[in-house]
Amino acid sequence: MTYGQFWRINAVTIAILIFIISLTPDPEKMVQAQSFTTWLARMIFGNPTAADKIAHFMAYGGLAFFSILGFVNRPAHYIRIMSILMAYGFLLEIFQAMGGIRQGDGADMLANGAGVIMGAGGAFCVRYFTRYFGINIPFPIRPKTRSSS
């Protein structure tokens, strides 16, 4: 398996999991995931009710991170991938509202968007530091290396 395949498989897997969990009628029954995000919400905000927003942030951050490392071929594609992922999060929230069992939430949309931005920033940092330290991890796009002059 190449690095590109690794990034892409993870991105697609996360997108599928987000889709399934977003449209599950009662995700509160997933106790293991909730206990972790509840703990994080208590640690960060002192309020366990923010666990849902942290889960959205982490899920879309991971999706953006792997998507950008796997699918970005040119620097201009950063914005395109980020826009697609934000639209994906927006549409899933709309689908939740249309289902009647769950309700869409504007704060969830903001958490999704913030996660996409942070995940994209993380992917950018990984690319920058691998280039800076000369680590040879092939990405679909390899930034130009410094010329030794």
Image: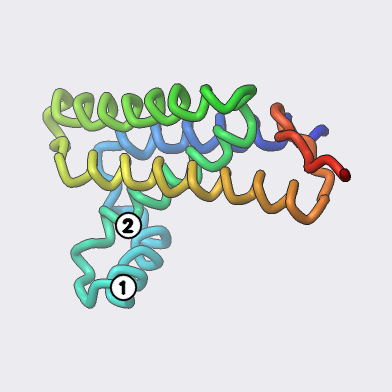
Q: Three-letter amino acid code at disc 2?
A: Ile
Q: x, y (%) of residue 31?
A: 36, 60
| Above or below: residue 135 compared with residue 31 | above
Q: Secondary structure at mark 2?
A: helix
* Towards the viewer: 113 or 38: 113
Residue that lies at the very extreme toward the front in this rendered image: 149
Quadrant placement of the N terminus: top right
Q: CA distance from mark 1 to mark 2?
A: 10 Å
Q: x, y (%) of residue 65?
A: 54, 42
List the residue tagged with mark 2: 54
Q: Secondary structure at mark 1?
A: helix
At 31% from the left and 73% from the top, the residue drawn is: 44
Residue 39 falls in which quadrant of the image? bottom left
What's the mark number on residue 44?
1
The way the protein has been coloured in the rendering is: rainbow
For marks 1 and 2, the one nearer the N-term is 1
| Above or below: residue 66 compared with residue 118 | above
* Towards the viewer: 147 or 93: 147
At 14% from the left and 23% from the top, the residue drawn is: 98
Would you say the residues marked 1 and 2 are in contact, meaning their CB atoms lie under 8 Å apart? Answer: yes
Residue 85 falls in which quadrant of the image? top left
At 44% from the left and 46% from the top, the residue drawn is: 61
Residue 90 falls in which quadrant of the image? top left
* Towards the viewer: 57 or 75: 75
Q: Residues within 10 Å of mark 1 (few under 14, many from 20)?
A: few
Quadrant placement of the C terminus: top right
Q: x, y (%) of residue 34?
A: 34, 61
Q: x, y (%) of residue 125?
A: 59, 50
At 23% from the left and 43% from the top, the residue drawn is: 110
In the picture, measured across the screen, residue 126 lies left or right of residue 41, that is right
Q: Three-letter amino acid code at disc 1?
A: Ile
